[in-house]
Amino acid sequence: MEQSEIYIKHYINARNVLIDLLYTIIISTLIAAFLTFTGITTKSFIINLIVSQSFGISICSIIMFLLWIFKPEKSASLAFIFTIGVGSGILIGLQIGPFVLQQIFSIALKPQDRGLLQTIIIAIAFGSAVSYFFYARARLRVSEEEIQQERIKRLSSEKEALEANLRLLQAQIEPHFLFNTLSNILSLIDTDPTNGKSMLMDLIHYLRTSLSRTFPDPITLDQEIDMIKAYLNIQKIRMGERLHFKIELSDAVRKHPFPPMLLQPLVENAVKHGLEPKMEGGAIMIKVGEEDEVIRIEISDDGQGFSSFNKTGVGIGNVRERIRLLYGEKGRLILEENKPNGVRAIIEVPKHDLQSYYC
Amino acid sequence: MIYKAIIADDEKELRTYLKSILSEIWPELLICGEAKNGKEALELVESKRPQIAFLDIRMPGLSGMEVAKRIAGLCRIVFVTAFDQYAVEAFEKEAVDYLLKPVSKDRLIQTIQRLKNQLSSSTEPPARLAEVVEQVLSKLPGRGGSDFLRWIKTQNKESIRLIPVEEADYFKAEDKYTLVITKEGESLIKKSIKELVQELDPGQFWQIHRGTIVNVSKIDKVSRSLTGRGILKLKERPELLTVSRNYLHLFKQM
């Protein structure tokens, strides 16, 4: 019973109160019908109905009111409230019933009516039974709600953890890339210090962004593109004439929020598996724009393409999994053959949909 | 005697750098050629007959390891690598010469001392190198026997889509061709189930019926039907697949 406070707090809200009142009216009507047709009372259905409703509504209102005021924490005080509710509800109902009959239907009940004691006994019996039903139902419903909420909480935290893991994997810096770049810089210090400096600056930018992007802070598309530029600048120095690249970023989406490290792996794939292994190298074309309510990003290369037996699926699987976690069915990654050769990766994600995840 | 060497690296700046520190440490060494890929390196070794080849491991076309395999008896080889754990461990164990990028002067001095000793003591380069290289190549990830199908190409309107094979839930025969079923939908591929069985990794894909191949990692459970066949349930998919009697042994308990 330690959780009673939680469920009472949850339970008393406008919707539940209305639903319980409605149930009370239906049950009271059934009781009136039962009493009339079994002949337990000799009164007409209308009288039974009015009396039954006035007991029912009184008991229900008082219990709700007491729960709302006292918010009991122990089962004993909860039961006490129900008992008080049934008792005082019957007393009030006894006043209201005849009053309504008198005022609206002009039916006067004689004060010393023989049925008074019988009415009270019936009221207590039904009142207690029905109240107990509500009591049990309230507990059940609240604990179901709690279980549901627990589940949602657990699932979303699992989802977040998975996303964080995938993001971390993607933010990992490839050692080959790092040491080759450092070797280049070392050499350029002697042969071409200006170029060496700018390569070092690009490396610093790339490292800083990679490292900061292990955090889930939202970034904008132009920040991701800046990082990709730094990466491609470095690769351009390494590969020389074997690499050309062009980036088109439409102004409309420049400041749009975007998940960090989602494009980077695809660009790295294009360089690593498309152009680096190809002797004459090639070009990378990146287009970022919008179409209706969709952000569309194309990364095309004219490299050697994925041969059927090439093992490069891991990074792509990660990107696809992250899109699924972040956007559900609304986002997708498509891989196509680029004509006449190479690969085109297309990411499509809905606009204005990411904030909900990050906030 | 004046020794000759070639340098093979796809990055121009790194060739220049190695050349400049070599000229400092071993001025008598003649760099008789530079190669920017494996193929050029092979040609240079054959035409210039150097005593030493500095080979970058990752190069387009032929890798440094593949070049080494072919020229092992012809000259001494020094591998140069930025980061190849497997290879470096093997080189260390088998006393193969290698340099790590960025190449440090101290390390290069040591390597050159060893080379000079070897060159002056024995005339023939060690042939055992080919074995070591072969051994490393077979252990590299994504190599050595794993020549299974990785990508499925499917026609989609104007374009050809690429699907990583591990994303396929299952394959189903459709006339002469095959339907590949993934989370995203179905597409037709111009290969028969028979061909696919040959090309797919048998550890990851099992044929369970004349017309069905299933991705093992997507299997939820298998139960017996009244007729003695198996009913296979996939994860995250509503449909049930039939396992014919011939393939039921795959699901026998260990």
Image: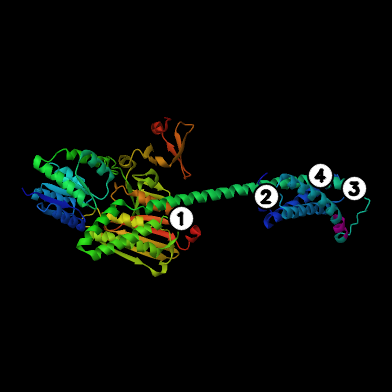
Q: CA distance from mark 1 to mark 3?
A: 68 Å
Using the rendered image, report if marks 3 and 4 lie on a common chain: yes
Q: Amino acid at mark 4?
A: Ala
Quadrant in the rendering for residue A337: bottom left
Q: Is residue A197 above or below residue B123?
A: below
Q: Chain of mark 4?
A: A
Q: Which comes sooner in the sequence, label 2 or label 1?
A: 2
Please give the name of the residue rendered at 72% of the width and 45% of the height, measured from the top-left corner.
A75
Q: CA distance from mark 2 to mark 3?
A: 41 Å
Q: Which residues are magenta?
A: A97-102
Please give the name of the residue rendered at 44% of the width and 33% of the height, measured from the top-left corner.
B229
Q: CA distance from mark 2 to mark 1?
A: 36 Å
Quadrant in the rendering for residue B159: bottom left
Magenta-colored stretch includes residue A244? no
Q: Which residue is mark 4?
A: A125
- Labels 1 & 3 near each other (Cβ < 8 A): no
Q: Position of residue B143 (x, y in %)?
A: 27, 43
- The residue nearer to you, when weighing B116 against A32, is B116
- Labels 2 & 1 near each other (Cβ < 8 A): no
Q: Which comes sooner in the sequence, label 3 or label 4?
A: 3
Horizontal side of A10 relative to A267 (left or right) equals right
Q: The N terminus of chain A is located in which quarter? A: top right
Q: Which comes sooner in the sequence, label 4 or label 2?
A: 2
Q: Which residue is mark 3?
A: A115
Q: Amino acid at mark 2?
A: Glu
Closer to the camera: disc 2 or disc 3?
A: 2
Q: Position of residue A184 (x, y in %)?
A: 24, 58
Please give the name of the residue rendered at 36% of the width and 52% of the height, measured from the top-left corner.
A172
Q: Amino acid at mark 3?
A: Gly
